[in-house]
Amino acid sequence: MLKVENLQKSFFTEEIETIALAGVSFEVKEGEFVAIMGPSGCGKSTLLRAVNLMHNLYPNIRVDGEILLNGENILSMEPIEVRRRVGMVFQRPTPFPTMSIYDNVLAGFALNGIKLSKSDRDETVERCLRNVSLWDEVKDVLNKKGTFLSGGQQQRLCIARALAMKPDVLLMDEPTSALDPISTSKIEDLAMDLKKQYTIVIVTHNMQQALRISDRTA
């Protein structure tokens, strides 16, 4: 499903080149849950952001090598297409602050210019919120802002937003590091459920977490 070959990522400041990733190679099979581990500052998040083409936002970053998604090189694809097929959940919850819970789930469709009927929108919101075990908690407050929710609920909302586009791969960048132990446990349980339907790559510095939830570690 995902194959990274000899990936190198460099940052440039004036005449100085800093190599953040050097010759990274690994692959993830369909339906697999892989944890990427390592000490702080070693390039875990940098690697994940390369897979989602987030370096395209900055002119002073160069990426070499190949990142293949089902055999297609991500580095030669349009970023919006990549981000539709590769969902991303960040370290801190990132609901869009001006949007309601309902609209946060559907944000990917709006950004991609995809129009849905009212019934399809309603079905998508309910399905995705049920997938992250959030529907029963928010079904009566869907018009409230996403930032109205607790930190753990916001992170589950962000996962629902990523799942709405039915991605091939879901990337999770230390999704529990900013959460309390109870919320962390809920996110881990959710991740275990999601791996029945999705290919997942998670960045973590927590060895016990990797042991609990992943099939393999890198």
Image: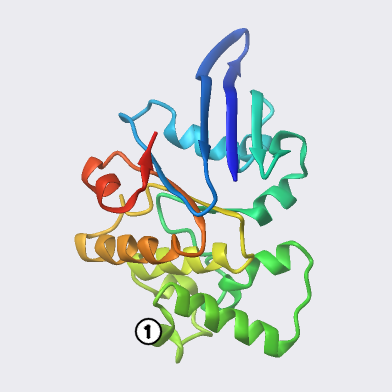
Looking at the image, is 122 positioned above or below residue 33?
below
Q: Is residue 134 left or right of residue 168?
A: left
- Give residue 136's position: percent from left, percent from top: 39, 87
Q: Is residue 148 left or right of residue 114?
A: left
Q: Quadrant of residue 192?
A: bottom left
Identified by mark 1, the residue type is: Glu
Q: Can you identify the residue that label 1 sits on?
A: 137
Looking at the image, is 11 positioned above or below residue 178?
above
Question: 218 or 77, which is in the foreground?
Answer: 218
Image quadrant occupied by the C terminus: top left
- Give residue 163's position: percent from left, percent from top: 56, 65
Question: 175 or 95, which is in the foreground?
Answer: 175
Q: Residue furthest top?
A: 15
Q: Residue at x 31, y 60 (%)?
A: 188
Q: Is residue 205 left or right of residue 81?
A: left
Question: 55 or 60, which is in the foreground?
Answer: 55
Question: 120 or 68, which is in the foreground?
Answer: 68
Looking at the image, is 171 positioned above or below residue 58?
below
Disc 1 packing (10 Å; few <14; some 14–19; many ≥20): few
Q: Quadrant of residue 116?
A: bottom right
Q: Residue at x 46, y 80 (%)?
A: 130
Q: Residue at x 38, y 53 (%)?
A: 175
- Give residue 173's position: percent from left, percent from top: 43, 46
In what element is the residue under mark 1?
A: helix
- Give residue 23's position: percent from left, percent from top: 53, 18
